[in-house]
Amino acid sequence: MNQAKLKTYWYPLLAFKSLKRKPQSVMLLGKPLVLVRLGEKIVCLEDRCPHRNVALSDGFVEKGNLRCAYHGWTFDEQGVVTKIPGCACLEEPITIKSYRVHVDSGIIWVCLEGERAFNNPFTCKDIEVDRRIHFKRLKADFIHTIENFLDPTHTPFIHKGLLRIESKQQRMHVTQELKEEGFVTQYQLVDKQNGLINTLFDNGVDTNIASFTMPGFAQIDYLQKKRVVFRVQIFFVPYTEGEVGMVVCVNLPKSWTTPLTFLALRPFMELAYIQDKRILERQFTLQKSYDKPYVSTPNDLVIDHLVHFFCDAPIGTCKTATMSL
Ligand code: FES
Ligand SMILES: [Fe+2]
């Protein structure tokens, strides 16, 4: 993946409410970071004390500064060493890297490099929604985890009965469009989706629109007569090679019944997540043992676009097809 490009985007790393007095270690693009509250501010520093490379996330907050747990060096919000116990004066300033932080939607966001303006892709401007946000993590390949969410061809197998049933095929017309920083796939449904979730919750979805925006934001809209009735958004975060974070935001149009619908939906969505997690983690383990190229067909709707955006591969072709799943 093009790491230099990926470092310039904003990523959601932690729920604001989970950061209490104790500093928290987080990973982003293979870099260990520490998130800490210093006074009113949320600060992100590299998670490394320059004295003996100890994790600052094992340290503690004292008088608005972060102290290393090993020999007590003290760091301010810019990552500047302000005090060394037993050392009267510092001849040269000692500094560790600090990173830009933004708090929005109850989430702490971090940008590693550059001046890119903050943008929160979870914001819904077109509909008024109630939402639930969950943080997940899995030991899997980053690109393949996004592919899994955006490509429905696995659903009759991994989510057999839950999302689709192979024997009762569902026909749909697929069209795809490439954007500057992503792509959109539209599924015009000919037949109703046939899994248990649809039997219980779907009363007439006729279109699905799945979109992807760099550096890891995916959204699936379920529409009924052009009205969004359900929206799932996931921000995939590349913690390390082989560890992916997922900030999952489930949205329903605001109404007095939405709290109940969220409760009823939760176990089914958790089950779908567990089913995907199992196969993605197995895939990642095996992938390390094989270096053979994949065999793909036009039915693999998103992989070439993802490889284009993440690995600078040539532009993929947009698909137009009638599919049965
Ligand atoms: S390792 Fe941090 S103060 Fe010594
Ligand atoms: Fe899935």
Image: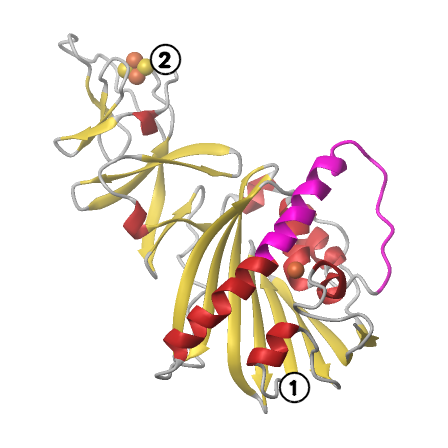
Between residues 238 and 179, which one lies in front from this camera angle? 238
Q: How is the image coloured?
A: secondary structure
Residue 141 versus residue 262 in the image, above or below: above
Q: Quadrant of residue 314?
A: bottom right
Classed neighbour count for the residue bearing mark 2: other residues with Cα under 10 Å, few (<14), some (14–19), many (≥20): few
* Image quarter (top left, top right, bottom left or bottom right) of the C terminus: bottom right
| Magenta segment boundaries in residue numbering | 273-298
Disc 2 to disc 1, C-alpha distance: 60 Å
Asked whether, in this view, residue 121 is left or right of residue 153, the answer is left
Q: Which residue is mark 1?
A: 206
Between residues 163 and 12, which one lies in front from this camera angle? 163
Between residues 191 and 105, which one lies in front from this camera angle? 191
| Residue at image point 71% right, 83% down | 188
Asked whether, in this view, residue 6 is left or right of residue 168, the answer is left
Mark 2, ligand 1, within 8 Å: the answer is yes
Image coords of residue 143 (percent x, y)? 66, 49
From this viewpoint, is residue 180 visible? Answer: no
Residue 213 versus residue 26 in the image, above or below: below
From this viewpoint, is residue 15 visible? Answer: yes
| Residue at image point 31% right, 51% down | 16
Q: Which residue is mark 2?
A: 52
Q: Of tags 2 and 1, which is closer to the observer?
A: 1
Image coords of residue 194 (percent x, y)? 70, 77
The numbered disc on residue 157 is none
Asked whether, in this view, residue 301 is left or right of residue 32, the answer is right
Q: Amino acid at mark 2?
A: Arg
Q: Amino acid at mark 1?
A: Asp
Between residues 36 and 91, which one lies in front from this camera angle? 36
